[in-house]
Image: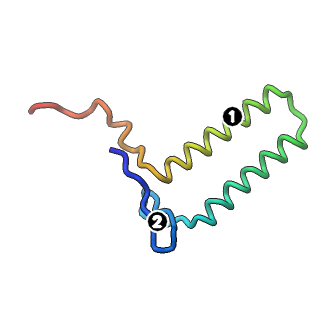
């Protein structure tokens, strides 16, 4: 069962551990990741294919991290383990 994130009294996101994560902190982390990726893409010489793969991996990891803040994916591993009957 997926549970949506709750919001605290100051607009903080309440993550699955029940701890608040301020929206400002979330934005700062995303900006830092973006700046790091910009520096890597602009100043580190790499083949275009490798840069594309690196960008895709970082985007996927960030999206999964963001989704984990808002939804509980811990129960996905339990699919198919529910018993029916006795």
Asked if disc 1 and disc 2 are in contact, CB closer than 8 Å, the reply is no
Answer with the quarter of the image where residue 85 lies: top left
Residue 47 vs 30, above or below: the answer is above
Q: Identify the residue at image location x=18%, y=32%.
A: 83
The front one of 65 and 86 is 65
Quarter of the picture holding the N terminus: top left
How far across and how far down the image is residue 17, in percent?
A: 43, 59
Q: Where is residue 72 in the image (x, y as percent from the top left)?
A: 41, 48
Quadrant of the image occupied by residue 23: bottom right
SS type, badge 1: helix
Q: Distance between the residues labelled 1 and 2?
A: 29 Å
**In this image, 60 relative to 4: left or right?**
right
Tally of numbered tags = 2
Q: Which residue is drawn at 79% across and 25% down?
A: 49
Q: Residue at x 90, y 35 (%)?
A: 45
Q: Nearer the viewer, mark 1 or mark 2?
A: 1
The residue that appears at 32% across and 37% down in the rendered structure is: 78
Mark 1 Cα-neighbour bin, 10 Å: few <14, some 14–19, many ≥20: few
The residue sitting at the top extreme is 49
Q: Where is residue 38 in the image (x, y as percent from the top left)?
A: 82, 46
Left or right of 61, for residue 45: right
Q: Choose top left, top right, bottom left or bottom right for residue 6.
A: bottom left
Q: Mark 2 points at which residue?
A: 19
Image mark for residue 56: 1
Q: Is residue 54 above or below residue 69?
A: above
Q: Earlier in the sequence, mark 1 or mark 2?
A: 2
């Amino acid at each position: 069962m997926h549970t949506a994130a709750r919001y605290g009294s100051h607009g903080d996101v309440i993550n699955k551990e029940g701890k608040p994560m301020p929206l400002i902190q979330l934005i700062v982390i995303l900006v830092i990741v973006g700046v790091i990726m910009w520096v890597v893409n602009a100043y580190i010489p790499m083949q275009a294919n490798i840069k594309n793969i690196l960008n895709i991996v970082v985007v996927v990891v960030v999206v999964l991290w963001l989704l984990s803040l808002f939804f509980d994916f811990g129960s996905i591993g339990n699919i198919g383990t529910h018993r029916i009957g006795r």
